[in-house]
Image (spheres, coloured by chain):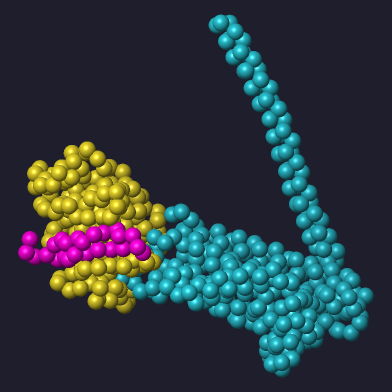
Chain colours: A yellow, B cyan
Amino acid sequence: MNDSKLETINYSLYYGKFRALKEITIKIPENKVTALIGPSGCGKSTFLRSFNRMNDLIAGVRTEGSVLIDGEDIFKTDPVALRQNVGMVFQKPNPFPKSIFDNVAYGPRVTGLKDHQKLEEIVERSLRSAALWDEVKDNLGKSGLDLSGGQQQRLCIARALAVEPTVILMDEPAASLDPIATLKIEDLIHELSANYTIVIVTHNMQQAGRVSDFTAFFYTDETRTGQLVEFTETRTLFTNPKDRRTEDYITGRFG
Amino acid sequence: MVEERLTEIALNHQAKAMSLKKERGKQKFWVGLMWLFGLITVLILILVVGYVLVQGGKAINWQFLVTPPKGGLSGEGGISTTIGTTFYLVGLTLLVATPLGVGAAVFLIEYAGEQSLSSKFLRSVISVSNFAVETLAGIPSIIFGLFGYALFVSTLKFGFSLLSASLAGACLVLPTIIRTTEEALLAVPDDYRRGSLALGATKWQTLYRIVLPAGLPGIITGIILSVGRIISETAVFFVTLGGSYRLPSSIMDGGRTLALHLYYLAMDTRAFDKAMGTGAVLVVMIILINLGINLVSRKLTAGVRKVR
């Protein structure tokens, strides 16, 4: 775990006076899948959003400690540039009300690319990487909203890939999908992990077991403040948890 | 014991059936009443529009549409120049009101809300402007006319002119444009904004590439509503546009719109048939505009509605 891509050091986050995350220190390895698991309200999604500074959009958010990407403090970088490097896939598929092509080309266009041939290349490559190309290649002009839920989510992944990020954050990407669509997303995550650092929030422990190389267990008590309890290789965490709370959670005693 | 219980249940059933019958009867009555009201409304509408169209139709012919009014007390002549003036005024007014109104709405919804959390000053600006927009929408239009007369016609010395009238008209339709644009923007799901920002788009790019296109149907609806408002307005233009029946040749010239012409014909001349004819043209224009609104918003919302 020397090659950490993302890192937080004593990172705390407050919504106004309420402390949502408490002193989290973690090193997330490069080109691996890291799952964030834990009971509802433990702050794992908030933590995920810290890496692309989407929390900046929420009023009254304040942070302490540091969040690093490639060793650099993300709060000293430009959030727009950061988000081009750190892509995000949301819980609910959110394609734009545009054609499939325009959805995928959105990111590159925003960064100033106008050359249509290059855009076509990027769109095809991204859709192929997102395992959607074969299903939509004849219908690139169709609205992204006309796709099924699972296809929409893969479209959103393709859209994120088109910006050529190095990190992809996924906030329960399969939560609103049926089992088959979920399986496709999981396969995709597995494939993408060769080239991308993926951090995924999931409620589903089986999913964490299936897709991730490392797992971080977040927990919260009556104070509702989220904290990191345990972080290690997924196999170790599920077979030999060190902390009592992790064991209780993964054996289904609560959560 | 068992029998008693059975009778009780049977009675209960009976009571329920009775009550249901009664409720059915009530429902029939009220639904019937609603139908009646609906029917009356439609009849009134048909009566008014039908009367104007039938009466006015007699006066309308090609000659009427392409001849300028003669002026004077006779009320003779056609309405060609007033149609032209109406279009000029609509165009000019929208040219002023649309950027202002859409810009104000974008500021209020997309920017002010988020920044206001940290600034007390901005918070009060927002509440004052929201209040102002609501109040403006309820003010009688002659007040806008008076204001336009005082400021544009006399103080700024624009005189009775297209310029004065379009500026006063812009004040009149601004609340409509702001309100409809605000509603259109609020209806755009936040998922789009987040999705765009997460891809490394700036706030401005998100706004003009995603949010504004998604809100366009609502914005256009507001603009078309304003067109109708301007076409049918008389009070404001009575005191800002003057009453010349000639076609204005510059924005400093006065003129009269269809609605104004109708007003003059009805009040100052004996040409009641011509007034009716003008009214019929006006009604047809308004109907066409409303059909246009429906068509446009249906076409443009086809893609957006699905997600919500």
Which residue is at a point 14% across and 54% down the rendered structure image? A231
Secondary structure that dominates the magenta span: strand
Q: Residue furthest bottom?
A: B157
Q: Is residue B279 left or right of residue A255?
A: right
Q: Is residue A203 left or right of residue A103?
A: left
Residue A5 inside the magenta-drawn segment: yes
Q: Is residue A89 visible?
A: no
Which residue is at a point 29% across and 73% down the rendered structure image? A79
A178 versus A229 height, above or below: above
Quadrant for residue B148, please give it: bottom right
Residue B249 inside the magenta-drawn segment: no
Which residue is at a point 64% across and 15% down the rendered structure image? B11
A252 versus B188 height, above or below: above
Where residue A145 sits: x, y (%)? 40, 56
Q: Nearer the viewer, residue A26 or B264?
A: A26
Q: Nearer the viewer, residue A34 or A210?
A: A34
Where residue A83 sits: x, y (%)? 27, 69
Q: Residue furthest left?
A: A2
Q: Nearer the viewer, residue A39 or B73?
A: A39
Which residue is at a point 34% across and 55% down the rendered structure image? A93
Q: Is residue A25 left or right of residue A141?
A: left
Quadrant for residue A127, please give it: bottom left
A201 versus B119 height, above or below: above
Quadrant for residue A94, please give it: bottom left
Where residue B151 sits: x, y (%)? 70, 88
Where residue B228 sits: x, y (%)? 68, 69
**If the image is split into quadrants, where does the N terminus of chain B sit?**
top right
Residue stretch rendered in magenta on the structure: A1-27
B250 versus A184 height, above or below: below
Q: Is residue A114 left or right of residue B221?
A: left
Q: Is residue A251 visible?
A: yes
